[in-house]
Amino acid sequence: MAAKKYNIHDLQSLRQQWQEIPIEAIPEKNRSLYQKRKEAVDMYIDGYGLLDIERITGISQKHISTFIKKCLITSQNEMYGYQALIPNVKLGKSHSVGRFLQLLEQYPSLSEFITGNYFGNKKYTLEKNMNLTTLHEKFLSECLRLGIQQHEYPFNTANRGYVSLCKYVRKIAFGDINKQAVRESENNRQKLRSTGIGKRYTTNTFFPFDVVQIDGHVLDLIYNIKIMNSDNTIHKTTATRAWLIAVIDVATRCILGYSVSQEFTYNQYDVMEAIKHAIEPHEKINLTIKNLKYPPNGGYYSIAYPELQYVLFNTIMLDNAKSHLSEHTVNKIVNELKSTISFGSVATPETRGIIERFFGSLETRGFHKLPSTTGSNTNDLKRKNPESASIKYDITYDEITELLELLIAEYNNTPHRGIDNLTPLECMRKKIFEVGMIPTLADEKMLSTIKKLNFRTDTRKVCGKTKNGKRAYINFMGTEYRSNKLALTGNYIGQTVTIMYNPKDISTIDVYTSDGLFIDTLIARGEFGTKSHSIKTRKNANRFAREQGWRQHDYNTPIAAYEEHLNDKGKRSRRAATQADIIRREQGKPTYSELYSMQAKTTTQNLDTTETDGNKFAYEDIKDLTPYELYDLMFGNNRNKRRGD
């Protein structure tokens, strides 16, 4: 046996730490050479002589020690081992090699100084995300402070160690991604914290309706709103983007229900509306867009399978958005629906990947194909003047909701790789009707709860003084509520009662005694009792009235005044225009878009020829007139005659 350069026993111990590399993982052209090198190294460690190793493996004696040395090189406290024997693979240098690393070994505080400044440690700097040029300048200053002379490294090189410093910083950045995340954006930090490190602690459910995910998504589309000018002409303006709040079944990827909000941000009532929509039987909407039609099975689970109406969920996954965290939302889900809530981290869609993938599919297959799309971001090539396109092509909110209804129906009938290329509705059918994974259906008691799932309850004291002739009433949201039944008796005055109301329409409220007995339905005073309106509209109308300094009395019309204010402001503000459209929809009045359509239809159908006082006007003569001018032309003379009479 020839003399050995290395201690055989030490090598045998170290070899146990080396990871075996499957020969299939190595490129085929390099496999033969790798096997010879590995055999030579193993024979050396097993005590064979150099001549025998060369004769058996064909590896030169002078190369064997070089291969051993490469195997012993460490990187991030781990030896390369057999990896060092793979042909054409570049290995990092040993920590003991290189003048820069030698400098750090000689002055250990320099390493901490570089790391601290780069990662923003307050001990070294208050500057955030320090760039490499600044770091290099501080590095040189620190070298001088440590006593390194101008004729020594790094000052005696052309770039004064800048390139080596950059390589070292890149190495420490890749070596600790948690510290590197500190330098990144908040979005990247959230993503890093919300993703795993190789081991999964949760599994997706196999049972339909066991776990559902709920989240909101702002649609990548601009639509237009029509508001009335003072001269009765109609002005088109763009609205704020609408929100979709969807409920998806994790096991089948089926969209169970949804709600849409025109508001700038969606709220807790929109979340409860989506949950209610997911439980109740789906009702088809009247489609007005040409060539749009529902799939043969209806596109929604309660239409395709009527046996599955009023199905309850076991667990609802929400994020920590404020609209989800309200006490009302939690109470309704836990205490009334009897479901559990699984909260995820804020701004971490990775924890709700299933519903986020649905939002992506919805946009790429639908809204991104329309001319008024905003694209996925401001730099998206699909984004080309969406505001102008929404007005040019007259894209309305009603058309968006129709398209959304059909896109979701198509999604529920589209094969999905995550469920063995079945459609969500097919997957649901197989699991429930073939395998027998029967979900929980609501009983009679739960049905009444579901019908008023989006209602809220509160307590109020009944006001009034019989000796002053003040009949009983209740104050709610700055307005008095009364009814004949409540006013006919003074028995309830001074008592605390329970009120129940729909946040989408607080023109009336239901009142119950503290024992739960129904008293009556109360109507709001004045205009608030004659027009349907939401809590938000009431708050905004009252705020606007206070700002105007108006006195509150029977003849106030705060909703009408607020709507008129929004119409005027809507020419300059997208939010105001959108809010005006919301108020009209709450009242059940035709929107100006609908009035515009009815006007155009009437003009086209009935005014091919128009006769007034013996004169006939061709359609071409009147098609460009404003509604006011047309009215004046048709009825002006008669109006003057009436004035004369």
Image (cartoon, rainbow, N blue to C red):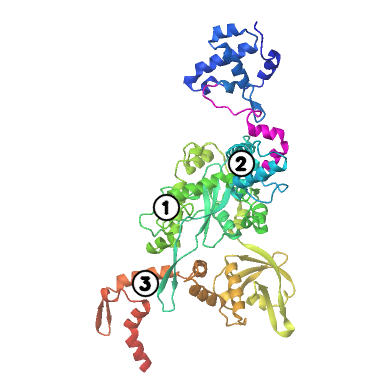
Q: Secondary structure at mark 1?
A: loop
Residue at 66% over, 11% down: 4
In the drawing, does residue 410 fall left or right of residue 455? left
Q: Is residue 452 visible?
A: no
Residue extending farthest front:
151
Upstream in the sequence, badge 1 or badge 2? 2
Q: Disc 3 on helix, strand or loop?
A: helix
Q: Marks 3/1: CA distance?
A: 34 Å
The image quarter containing residue 7 is top right
Pair 3/2: label in front:
2
Span of residues in magenta: 86-115
Residue at the spot 44% in from the left edge and 43% down from the top edge: 414
Res. 79 visible in picture: yes
- Tag of residue 382: 1
| Marks 3 and 2, how far apart at CA | 55 Å
Which residue carries the number 3 mark?
599
Image coordinates of residue 591 in percent, x first then y, are: 45, 69
How many angstroms separate mark 1 from mark 2 (CA)?
Answer: 30 Å
User: Is residue 93 highlighted in magenta?
Assistant: yes
Q: What residue did someone put label 2 on? A: 195
Circle 3 Cα neighbour tier, 10 Å, few/some/many (<14 / 14–19 / ≥20): few
Q: Nearer the viewer, residue 426 or 418?
A: 418
Res 485 quadrant in image: bottom right
